[in-house]
Image: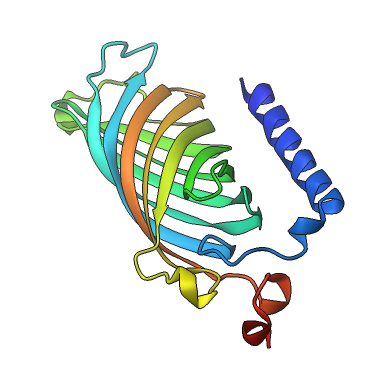
Amino acid sequence: MRILVFNLLLLAVGSGLAQAQTDPTTELRVPAPKQGYFVELGLRSGVLAVSNDELPDLDPFPGFGGAFRFGEMTLPWLGFGGVGHVFFGSNDEFTTGFGAFSMEAQVAPFKNLDLAGRVAIGPFFQVVTREDESLALDDDPDQGFGAILTTGVSWDLFPFYDRQAYGSGGFAVSLYADGQFLLGSDFTSAGAFIGVELGYFFGLPKNKLKLPLEEAY
């Protein structure tokens, strides 16, 4: 699975670079809010299922966490960057938490709709502990690490963007849903999450935009 995702990311990079070299329309772009470098910070909630050989019947872990995302829309429909995730959850017997950092690609196939599919892969570190430490066993698993795969969709809203002002970039509110699969040394986990992020797209300079003559200078 990890090899397949890596190959897909390489294919996306290669196709993006090829289009940038052969399509003259990539030199000047129509102004839009989702352009240039971006940063986003948000909250997420969801449920994580955890399995382990010593404790195969762990109940699901509902919880919450956060996300930090940064990168660049290198083409109108393709962006790359990094994303950091944290999550904390608990059930009647155990608590868990994990942190991860991944390299991410997003594809926005719809020209007039800021809806994107996301895929990311990277390392993670996870901890599982008993709620009541007096019940802890010598062979209880406590921590693990491995590779995390994230797939999901996002919808970027630009509430203050004025399309008649020929602007590029702007403040964004992003709604997203994703699934995460954690393939670790001691745990195998899977979760489903929803979240909201506040962010900013820094846009493109005027010399890279298709603008009316009176706006270009």
Q: Is residue 18 above or below residue 190?
A: below
Residue 192, percent from left and from top: 34, 30
To which quarter of the image does residue 206 belong?
Answer: bottom right
Q: Is residue 89 above or below residue 21?
A: above
Q: How is the image coloured?
A: rainbow
Number of marks drawn: 0
Residue sitting at 26 percent across and 17 percent down? 58
Which of the pair 97/171 is nearer the observer? 171
Is 112 on the left or on the right of 156, as rendered? Answer: right
Residue 145, percent from left and from top: 50, 32
Q: Is residue 14 above or below residue 170?
A: above
Is 107 on the left or on the right of 20, as rendered? Answer: left
Residue 102, percent from left and from top: 56, 44
Is 171 on the left or on the right of 24, as rendered? Answer: left
Residue 42, percent from left and from top: 35, 55
Give the position of the C terminus as an image quadrant.
bottom right
Q: Residue furthest right?
A: 22
Residue sitting at 26 percent across and 20 percent down? 137
To which quarter of the image does residue 127 belong?
Answer: top left
Q: Residue furthest front?
A: 213
Which of the pair 159/105 is nearer the observer? 159
Residue sitting at 31 percent across and 40 percent down? 194
Residue sitting at 52 percent across and 31 percent down? 149
Give the position of the N terminus as an image quadrant.
top right
